[in-house]
Image (cartoon, rainbow, N blue to C red):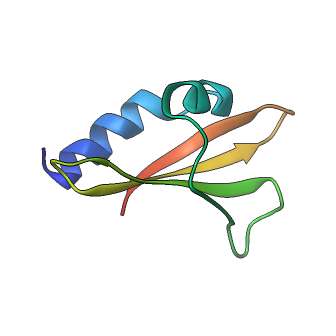
Amino acid sequence: MMRTQREKIMQAQWAGKSYAALTEALGEPQMIMSVPGRSDHSTAKVYGILDEGSQCIDAFTVVTVTGEPVISHYFCR
């Protein structure tokens, strides 16, 4: 699967879903990073290469707005 296709599919699958659902499906991320210039309510969760076909390093931006962290964006890196 090409990287752009995976990014579209994963964005459609995860955008707006809870971070709890993500960790249930994929486990804990390998790395958690703050997002420079953003509030403390926004982090990047990096999982590493989960898809051998696209060689994507799966990363998600997670935001907390109303108390529950939710997925804002998926990125193939």
Report the front residue among 25 and 41: 25
Check the image and report above or below for 77 versus 50. Answer: below
Q: Residue at x 38, y 32 (%)?
A: 12
Q: Which residue is drawn at 65% across and 34% down?
A: 19
Q: Residue at x 21, y 49 (%)?
A: 52
List the single residue furthest toward the bottom.
36
Residue 13: percent from the left, percent from the top? 40, 28
Task: Quadrant for the C terminus, please.
Answer: bottom left
Query: Where is residue 21, by image quadrant?
Result: top right
Count of numbered circles on the image: 0
Report the front residue among 27 and 40: 27
Residue 42: percent from the left, percent from the top? 73, 55
Report the front residue among 34 and 66: 34
Q: Is residue 14 left or right of residue 57?
A: right
Q: Is residue 69 left or right of residue 9?
A: right
Residue 71: percent from the left, percent from the top? 59, 39
Q: Residue at x 58, y 25 (%)?
A: 24
Task: Quadrant for the N terminus, please.
Answer: top left
